[in-house]
């Protein structure tokens, strides 16, 4: 009898174990920042069930990684996918860049009803997982519209209720966009009160600060103050220095973040690896002009005195940049006339046969605003600052992008190539940071910050969000002149254990889901 038991045990041990997917012969970078190691990964039911030397395992599908890098799926902490997810749920621009999870609702811009939004994501099924922030601008707009004034106490209570509802519905935090309407009209204490509600549910305060140029120090101080007063973690979005007059100031701003962390504030930053930003044409105008909606804006701009005042404001800003022309703002998408996409304001002005003067260019900006405004790319950052910021260890990489509509407009290339650019240009070619560190910043650091508990690491029991890529060839192909090009070098992308990129091609699988933050 004893021999029979032993025989049966040996048979059970020798029997091959079964998985749905088995990744073999990979160099595993687990997301911790540690060096890679050789190993196999078994996946079943959307989870990693075993990591190791799995020679006795079999699977329905075996992927030979061929000694390529196997890493956790990348987490893009700063996106704006609202509305686009319904048009293109496959999210190809993110998937081909190794992104398996996005955090949307940044810059104060979100859906006001987070519960309904996340339910829609689950019903729709996107190719990427989606977590969401509640946007302060949309909360304020829901209660007060775009009026330029302080909220009454009753309005303040309404805004607090909206934020609390969002946090209870699974939002990972609250975002602000303090250069946008109506967020720019908010005083610091208004944001603190809403951040305190966010803090009750262990949320993050993610901020597009009031300024990223001349007044960047004061803007950072405000973001840090809000975090300290409200008692919650801070995420400073797309950390940068805008304007030629501010080049080199990263040596001033990064130490501010470092000091705050040393004093006990959980503050981190994110960055896109480019020297140009992208936002609305309206940011060139003074904020007081933009209050109360489109009709009010156009009425103000028709007033000759106000029109001249706005022009002088823009010309003064141009002079601070030490530029003679509006060559740095380039049209990404102008619905009123798409033939202008890809042209700078200087070029647009000349194409209209106008005098080659900054005054004439300022008038063109106003005319474009009267026609509905435009999405823009702004060239105005220093490569040295990009690299200095990149070397800061508590800095994540983020695209600040939507789901791209292929061949529409002339958008910023960051929406296609952020991660591949870091891995190809800044890791492999320029050696600004090490590969292991880059992967940590794309995976476990954002997962920890936003409390995505089963993401960001290759460990048994974690969600099987996995990328397989060749670190010798991975590269971004999207450029400012030809932005609609997907990154290359990612052989496989798995989302919740489903193969979404197979041998470099999107399979059409939509295995993503809404990631609701649990209330602790």
Image: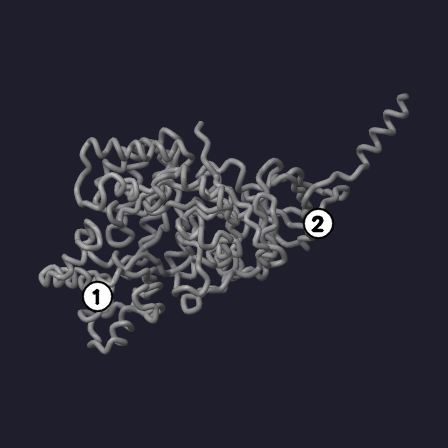
Q: Secondary structure at mark 2?
A: strand
Residue drawn at x 41%, y 39% is 116
In the drawing, what numbered circle is on residue 158?
none
Colouring chosen for the image of the structure: one colour
Q: Position of residue 296 (x, y in %)?
A: 17, 53
The residue nearer to you, when weighing 75 against 439, is 75
Q: Secondary structure at mark 1?
A: helix
Residue linked to disc 2: 62
Question: Distance of mark 1 from mark 2, alpha carbons?
Answer: 58 Å
Q: Position of residue 168 (x, y in %)?
A: 39, 31
- Label 1 Cα neighbours within 10 Å, binned few <14 / some 14-19 / many ≥20: some
Q: Residue furthest left?
A: 305
Q: Position of residue 463 (x, y in %)?
A: 57, 40
Let me know if residue 176 appears in the view: yes
Let me know if residue 437 appears in the view: no
- When the figure is inspected, residue 19 is found, relative to residue 492, above or below; the finding is above
Residue linked to disc 1: 367
């Amino acid at each position: 009898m004893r021999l029979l038991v032993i025989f049966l045990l040996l048979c059970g041990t020798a029997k091959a174990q079964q998985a749905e997917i088995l990744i073999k012969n990979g160099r595993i970078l687990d997301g911790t920042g540690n060096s890679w190691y050789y190993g196999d990964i078994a996946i079943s039911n959307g989870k990693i069930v075993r990591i190791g030397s799995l020679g006795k395992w079999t699977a329905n599908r075996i992927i030979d990684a061929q000694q390529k890098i196997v890493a956790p799926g990348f987490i893009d902490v700063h996106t704006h996918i609202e509305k686009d997810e319904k048009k293109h749920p496959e999210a190809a621009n993110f998937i081909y860049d190794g992104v398996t999870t996005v955090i949307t609702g940044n810059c104060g811009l979100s859906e006001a009803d987070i519960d309904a939004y996340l339910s829609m994501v689950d019903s729709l099924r996107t190719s990427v997982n989606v977590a969401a922030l509640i946007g302060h601008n949309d909360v304020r707009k829901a209660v007060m519209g775009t009026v330029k004034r302080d909220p009454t106490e009753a309005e303040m209570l309404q805004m607090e209720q909206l934020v609390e509802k969002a946090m209870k519905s699974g939002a990972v935090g609250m975002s602000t966009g303090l250069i946008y309407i109506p967020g720019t009209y908010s005083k610091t204490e208004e944001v603190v009160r809403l951040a305190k509600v966010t803090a009750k549910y262990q949320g993050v305060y993610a901020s597009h600060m009031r300024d990223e140029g001349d007044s960047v120090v004061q803007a950072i101080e405000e973001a840090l103050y809000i975090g300290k007063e409200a008692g919650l973690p801070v995420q400073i979005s797309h950390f940068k220095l805008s304007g030629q007059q501010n080049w080199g100031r990263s040596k001033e701003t990064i130490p501010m973040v470092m000091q705050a962390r040393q004093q006990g504030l959980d503050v981190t930053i994110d960055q896109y690896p480019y020297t140009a930003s992208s936002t609305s044409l309206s940011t060139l105008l003074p904020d007081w002009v933009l209050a109360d909606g489109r009709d009010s804006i156009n009425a103000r701009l028709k007033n000759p005195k106000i029109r001249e005042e706005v022009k002088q404001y823009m010309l003064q800003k141009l002079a601070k940049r030490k530029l003679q022309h509006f060559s740095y703002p380039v049209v990404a998408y102008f619905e009123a006339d798409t033939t202008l996409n890809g042209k700078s304001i200087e070029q647009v002005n000349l194409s209209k046969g106008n005098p080659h003067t900054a005054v004439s260019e300022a008038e063109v900006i106003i005319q474009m605003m009267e026609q509905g405004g435009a999405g823009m790319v702004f060239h105005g950052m220093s490569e040295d600052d990009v690299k200095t910021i990149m070397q800061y260890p508590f800095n994540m990489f983020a695209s600040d992008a939507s789901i791209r509509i292929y061949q529409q407009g002339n958008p910023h290339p960051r929406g296609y190539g952020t991660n591949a650019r870091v891995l190809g240009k800044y890791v492999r070619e320029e050696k600004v940071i090490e590969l292991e560190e880059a992967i940590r910043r794309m995976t476990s650091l954002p997962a920890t910050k936003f409390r995505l508990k089963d993401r960001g690491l290759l460990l048994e029991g974690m969600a099987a969000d996995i990328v397989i890529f060749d670190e010798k060839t991975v590269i971004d192909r999207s450029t400012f002149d030809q932005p609609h090009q997907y990154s290359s070098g990612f052989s496989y992308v798995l989302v919740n254990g489903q193969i979404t990129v197979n041998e470099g091609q999107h399979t059409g699988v939509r295995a993503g889901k809404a990631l609701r933050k649990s209330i602790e």
